[in-house]
Image: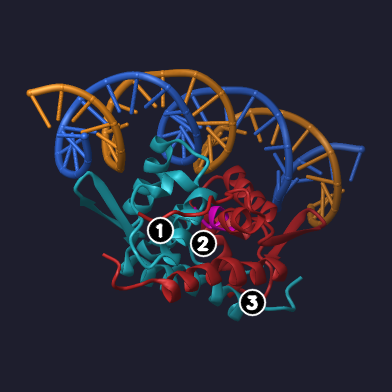
Chain colours: A red, B cyan, C blue, D orange
DNA sequence: TATATTCATCGTAAATCTACGATGAATAAT
DNA sequence: ATTATTCATCGTAGATTTACGATGAATATA
């Protein structure tokens, strides 16, 4: 029997990691991020055109990504230009990818 | 104006990446995975003791992680032994961490 | 000025998630 | 054999998510 310290699931790092993961937790949002990363120019309403979703739904997903700090949106006249947020990308790599990497590093293969 | 190819958000790689991210998208599940990675021995019911959640809730989170292929659970008498699933860890690194890494690599800083 | 385009937001229905207590099955301990 | 422990599952309430159409504000175009 092992005694373990209690875990604070309100720890800000844990919460932020989960928040970032949650933002990636829908196929449409994965597709949007990949799209934004692959284009040299910002994609505006074109995002809606390439996804099999209504405009309002895409707008909702964009908002989720923006709230999570993964993308930025700038109004350009009647359009809005979206692109990846470098700060969010860095966090994504440090927290989420870092977490994932640590799991393997720490994992004891003789466990089960 | 740029014309883009339609995106299939039912693409299996996109869907699996989102599925893995979704599994990480709750602080309790992040905490559980970290806990499992930090111990040399398998954790059994002790997980409930260190989380501020009811036993049934923890069991639900464990099931979510198991369904996503991130952990394994083996019954040991009256207890169940949980540990990370190596296959899931590999997928996590290849798909999710890989995706995160690609975003930065492909990202054009001259965008916005 | 009138019309069209773009996109955010509102309202809403259906699905999913999160949490809990209660229950029950399986095993261990007395 | 009886009792205690461990954990999964059920039922359920409340919150959140996801999807859509409708609407409206802002800007561009005719």
Chain letter of the residue carrying label 1: B
Say if mark 1 contacts mark 2, CB within 8 Å: no
Mark 3 lies on residue: B107
Q: Report helix, strand or loop for mark 3.
A: loop
Q: Main secondary structure of the magenta part?
A: helix
Chain letter of the residue carrying label 2: A
What are the residue bounds of the magenta stretch? A20-25
- Image quadrant holding the N terminus of chain B, namely bottom right
Chain letter of the residue carrying label 3: B
Question: Residue A80: x percent and y percent?
Answer: 74, 57
Mark 2 lies on residue: A31
Q: Residue at x 45, y 58 (%)?
A: B18
Q: Report helix, strand or loop for mark 2.
A: helix
Question: Residue A84: x percent and y percent?
Answer: 67, 67
Q: Which mark is first along the chain, 1 or 3?
A: 1
Say if mark 2 contacts mark 3, CB within 8 Å: no
Check if mark 2 and mark 3 are on a common chain: no
Decide which of A62, A96 is in the foreground and name it. Answer: A96
- Crowding around mark 3 (Cα neighbors within 10 Å: few <14, some 14 to 19, many 20+) is many
Residue B72 is left or right of residue D25, and the answer is left
Q: Residue at x 66, y 61 (%)?
A: A70
Mark 1 lies on residue: B15
Work out how far the residue at label 3 is from the one at label 1, CA to CA, in angstroms.
22 Å
- Crowding around mark 2 (Cα neighbors within 10 Å: few <14, some 14 to 19, many 20+) is many
Residue A24 colored in magenta in the image: yes
Decide which of A85, A60 is in the foreground and name it. Answer: A85
- Crowding around mark 1 (Cα neighbors within 10 Å: few <14, some 14 to 19, many 20+) is some
Task: Tell me the mark number nearer the camera, choosing from 1 and 2.
Answer: 1
Question: Residue A39: x percent and y percent?
Answer: 61, 74
- Residue B84, by quadrant, is bottom left
Q: Report helix, strand or loop for mark 1.
A: helix
């Amino acid at each position: 029997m092992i005694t373990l310290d209690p875990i604070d699931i309100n720890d800000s790092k844990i919460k932020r990691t989960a928040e970032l993961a949650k933002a990636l937790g829908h196929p449409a949002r994965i597709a949007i991020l990949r799209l934004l990363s692959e284009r040299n120019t910002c994609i505006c309403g074109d995002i809606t055109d390439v996804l099999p979703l209504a405009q309002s739904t895409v707008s909702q997903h964009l908002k989720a990504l923006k709230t999570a700090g993964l993308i930025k949106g700038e109004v350009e006249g009647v359009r809005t230009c979206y692109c990846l947020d470098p700060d969010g990308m860095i966090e994504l790599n440090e927290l989420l990818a870092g977490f994932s990497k640590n799991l393997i590093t720490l994992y004891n293969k003789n466990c089960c």
